Image: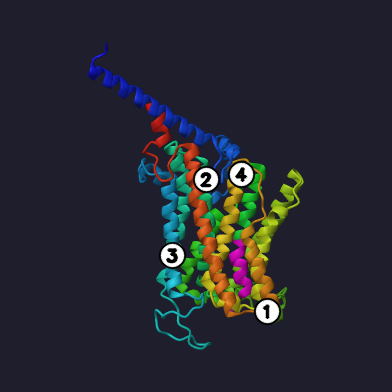
Amino acid sequence: MVPKDRHDDVVSSISIEEEEKETTTTINSVSTSGGYYLNEDARKQIHHYEYKGADNSLLYQYILSPLAAFLVNNVVPKSMAPNTVTSIGLVLMITAYSSYWWYVPTLEITATNDDGNDNDNESFRSYPPRWIFLWNGIALLAYQTLDNMDGKQARRTQSSSPLGLLFDHGCDAINSIFGSVNVIIGMNLTPSENMFEIWLLIFGPFIMFYIATWEQFYTGELIMPIINGPSEGLFGTAILSFISYWLGSQYWQQTDWFDTIDLIFSTTFSLQVVAEGGVKLRNCDFIVIFVALGIFQEIILKSIAVAQKYKRSGQDLIPLFVLSFCYLIIGWIDPNVWLEIPRTSLHLAMALFVEMSTELMLSHVTAQSFNPWRWQVVPLIGITIWVAIFGNSEVLQYWIIGYTWSTGAYLTMKCVCVINEICDVLEIWCFDIVTPHYKKTATSSS
């Protein structure tokens, strides 16, 4: 006969074991079942993903990478999650973008002048305080450094995961619009007068970013060329911001570069003949031309390489080009559609692009087939058709605002769900590498 107190201990022990078995069974059943965004096969495949890539940039190899390694080893605490490092960089860029938004809400230079002087050859136009250009340059360099640090921190703490790659990729996609808008304002480009240049500076980085991701989806690796956007591109953008701080944004509207080149080669030819209508090229025009050449090279070379090796027709790129050219067509028919709500229009483009690119990367890390046709773009096609037939209207503006908010809400919900599902599968936390995941705790206790 078992004593009463001993009997209670035995019963309690049996109950605890049964509860632990039920908990373990429940967890295992959740792990093997498919989630909303990750089906059962994706949850299995994500365990086997390994990142393969290299950055051949000399700037990265000899300056940016050693700097990031030094900061990781000497400044960043070992308890900090790599995704936290990434987030800090994105927050800095958001502050820079917000300062531009505060002083130049319509993308037009209409804020308070920092020196109070009128321009000699144009009607009075005030300029925002130059410190916003300085802060943007600093934020860009900080973002670039932190973006290089997160991977090194992951390897240092042995916390590398597909979630880290996806999180970093998503932050880069978001940051692409911030960098583009800050360049537009930094060069004093006026939307009503430079619609095509602004379109190119916004969607050019989108296209290059997406095609690089598309190539990685098929090749399984991300090989950055000797000159690339994440290294030389961001560094050059920071230099542009510093020039705007030092000389003012109106410097980019001058023709100093054109005059210098024309003077050097004046004995053989004149660039004024090349310029449309004999108008001199502005300094900002050279930047736009350089970006256009980079986009053209990215599209042609990578598309041909993937098409030849993997027999792809390029239909995966159609939704991205639909997004880009819908914006261009609407701006060509009636620029006021975008100019009346410029920030909302930019945020809509960002949300649609981020959804496209992160879905492509998610398919890559889970080894799933990619469906390029995004229903989120369908309303934009409808807006384009409406503008082509009926033109602009007040109702259309409310439609675009609602479209933007609903797309943003959907994208936010999707990101949160995907992060939670990946954390559940990999048994990790997104911003914590110290606290054990509840699954690991349950498994160890059983």
Q: Is residue 72 visible?
A: yes
Could you classify mark 3 by the number of other residues whose Cα lies within 10 Å: few (under 14), some (14-19), or many (20 or more)? many
Which of these two is toward me, 44 or 364?
A: 44
Marks 1 and 2, the one that precedes in the sequence: 2
The secondary element bearing badge 1 is classed as helix
Tag 2 residue: 165
* Residue type indicated by callout 1: Phe
Q: Specify the label residue 96 is tagged with.
A: 3
- Residue 269 image point, x, y percent: 72, 74
The secondary element bearing badge 3 is classed as helix
Q: CA distance from mark 4 to mark 1?
A: 41 Å
Tag 1 residue: 390
Q: CA distance from mark 1 to mark 3?
A: 38 Å
What range is drawn magenta here? 191-205
Left or right for 295, reference 132: right
Q: CA distance from mark 2 to mark 4?
A: 11 Å
Q: CA distance from mark 1 to mark 2?
A: 44 Å
Report the predominant secondary structure element of the magenta stretch. helix
Q: Which mark is nearer the camera, 2 or 4?
A: 4
Q: Are marks 1 and 2 in contact (CB under 8 Å)?
A: no
Q: Which mark is nearer the camera, 3 or 2?
A: 2
Look at the picture and state if 148 lies above or below 50. below
Marks 4 and 1, the one that precedes in the sequence: 4
Magenta run includes residue 192 = yes
Marks 1 and 3, the one that precedes in the sequence: 3
